[in-house]
Amino acid sequence: MILSLTRGFAIGGCIAIASASSLLADGPADNQAENVRPIPPPGVDIETAELNSLRSSIASVRDRWQQLMRTTKSNHQDSTARLKDLEAEVLVFPRAVEMTIEQSIFYSPRAVADAKRLLQIAEDRIDKIADGASWAEVVGLRTSDERQLIAGGFRSKIDDSFQPYGVVIPPNVNAMDASPIRMDLWLHGRGEKVSELAFLNKHSGDPKRYRTGNEPSPISAIVAHPYGRYSNAFKFAGEVDVLELSDYLQRRIAIDKHRIAIRGFSMGGAGCWQIATHYSDRFFAATPGAGFSETPLFLDVFQGEDAAGTAPDYQKTLWQLYDCPPWASNLRNLPTIAYSGEIDRQKQAADVMEAALAERGIELVHLIGPQTAHKIHPDSQQEIARRLDLIERQVSSSIPRNVHLTILTLRYSRMHWIEVTGMEEHWSPAIVNASILSNSTGTDDQIAIECENVSRLRVHFDSGQWPGKPSGQIAVTINGQPVVNSHNGPTVRSDRSLEAEFQLDGTWKVASDDSQTLRKRPRSQGPIDDAFMDRFVFVLPTGTSGDPAVEQWIQSESKHAMDHWRLHFRGDVRMIKDTDVDVETMANQNLILFGDATSNAVIARLLPKLPLQWTNDTIRIGKHEVSSVGHVPAIIYPNPEAPKHYIVINSGFTFREYDYLNNARQTPKLPDWALIDIREGANSRDPGKVISAGFFNESWQPE
């Protein structure tokens, strides 16, 4: 049985974060790894009677919901599927209050009243659902000539947690209509006191008193606000939440999928840069403001930290996951308007991207707020809105004939109708330029592709998307080589869809089925942190390691991993014992395994199938070897019994308390594998002393 640890969960360890006012921390003072500041900051003392009253109200909401579920199921008066569909819109509120109590993060006595208000909203929603209300009726969406605020929650696919969101609907915008409307996804700035409680209260408050600040206020578009799991610059699970919320709201409201913009400021500007460069085909425009766009220069300028001079090479390689300059060419696919205040030090982010784009022949539109510090100048706000409206008018549902894609990892492998499904070498740029061409009669019947560092690629046009000739076969050339022609190429199907995959095997040819071949492929490419961007479960040992030091470390680090998933990524901890792992558990998620072959039965079972030799005497990965005494491996690898999912051994997400102090530090700290000396214990930066670490090759083998 998988246990979801969502209430009364003890949080251990000391954690730190930057100030509430901006992305910036306190400069060199926050470069002391042995003395990190606590995060979230401690709240004010609340009377025990008040806390007990809130706990009682939380239990009441949950009990009422469960009773409604039981009654509905037994009486068949409604579908339990409908209740499950609406569950997050109710239970996100008691969860927010529960986490506030659990972590002692009430920041004023008034916050207790805010908590009571959220719990009352949950009670009211249960009443509406019991009466058969629709989603719109439950959340209060209506046709109005006044601004509307919606606060609610959706269920995360990663850990089943109920994650908050907000939606702002301008006056006279009819979100109830079937006519599709525009949606701007707005990514908020950093704030160490922006708990779920504070976020939900803001978005369920009085619309007349709602303060927009740097947020956009379009007159004909709704603005969706992802919570993004607090303060991680919308990376990792925060990134996934942004995409999930977009999909969730498109299911609820008639949103035009071709008119979704990605926008943000400060920490949200950083999130906007990275989401725009990684998912350029999902949006019609991007408007990043301030923030940061890479790691080493930002930390040098703002923290006085020489990360480039001190980080190990594998961490520098991993910076490329979220550093945006290497991905800048993807903005060829996405109209982008950058903003900076003239005297804002965070102008550095857009300056870096302006230079990166210039190197690729792209001139960045960079609006500057005159004599403005860390905010959006009102005139610039209007100019951004004007330009966005003009871009929106040109939006088309047609498929682009020319597509560019630059990637450094298969995590972000697709752009419109082109997908890279195999790379010659990870963490070196793989570049694709693909075009639909016409023959001498003007008929579109050819695809021409130029690429480098690509070993396998896929062409995919969904139903109705192929813009060329309505039937017959299509010719394809890759790097000037005719791969297939109009007699043996992929066929345009009756619904105007088309699909083909090609592989490099000396020369380019039609790909063979390699589904049983172990290789890095999209969503199965590492590094360790990638396992925490999809559904996962912690698998804890029931046995005991023969090495007391290793046993103590396993107990401590497994607790650290779970505590910090709860605290930093605001998640629910799903946990199972090794002896309870069955075929279904294997097949449905990534397994985060703690222990060794003596203590964890799943590790013992899978170990012979891994490129890891772990005996009583030594631990060896490739040519790298350490003593088993006082050492552990950390590794990510496709699950040998369920290759579409990962196993991770002895690691949670890899950045730690020190890295919470600045969002630019929140990058992967371990690659695909590491050998760790744990005899001196973990600290705020590392799980132990990393003896060696590296990446598996494209065949998931050590080099």
Image (tube, rainbow, N blue to C red):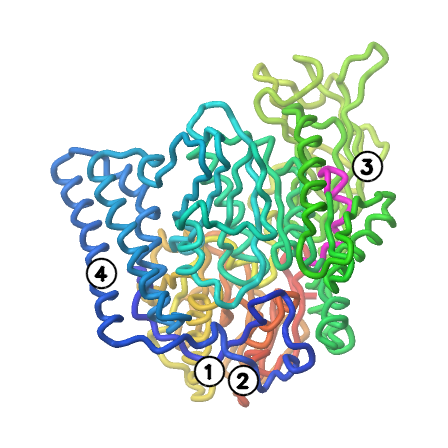
Give the quadrant of the C terminus.
bottom right
SS at badge 4: helix
- Mark 4 belongs to which amino acid? Ser
Q: Is residue 333 magenta?
A: yes
Residue on which the image places disc 2: 678
Q: CA distance from mark 2 to mark 3?
A: 48 Å
Counting from the top left corner in percent of width and height, residue 650 is at 49, 72
Using the rendered image of the protein, determine whether residue 628 is visible from the camera's viewpoint.
Answer: no
Say which residue appears at 32% left-offset and 60% top-offset: 2
Q: Answer whether labels 3 and 4 touch (C-beta < 8 Å).
A: no
Counting from the top left corner in percent of width and height, residue 438 is at 80, 18
Residue on which the image places disc 4: 57
SS at badge 3: strand
The residue most toward the front is 208
Label 1: few (<14), some or many (≥20) within 10 Å? Answer: many
Q: CA distance from mark 1 to mark 2?
A: 7 Å
Label 3: few (<14), some or many (≥20) within 10 Å? Answer: some
SS at badge 2: loop
Residue 384 vs residue 6, the one in the foreground: 384
- Mark 1 belongs to which amino acid? Trp
- The image quarter in which residue 105 lies: bottom left
Above/below status of 602 relative to 240? below
Using the rendered image of the protein, determine whether residue 699 is visible from the camera's viewpoint.
Answer: yes
Above/below status of 31 relative to 168? below
Counting from the top left corner in percent of width and height, residue 244 is at 49, 45
Say which residue appears at 61% left-offset and 38% top-offset: 282
Q: Answer whether labels 1 and 2 touch (C-beta < 8 Å).
A: yes
Counting from the top left corner in percent of width and height, residue 396 is at 66, 25
Say which residue appears at 39% left-offset and 70% top-offset: 108
Residue on which the image places disc 3: 450
Q: Answer whether labels 2 and 3 touch (C-beta < 8 Å).
A: no
Q: How many marks?
A: 4
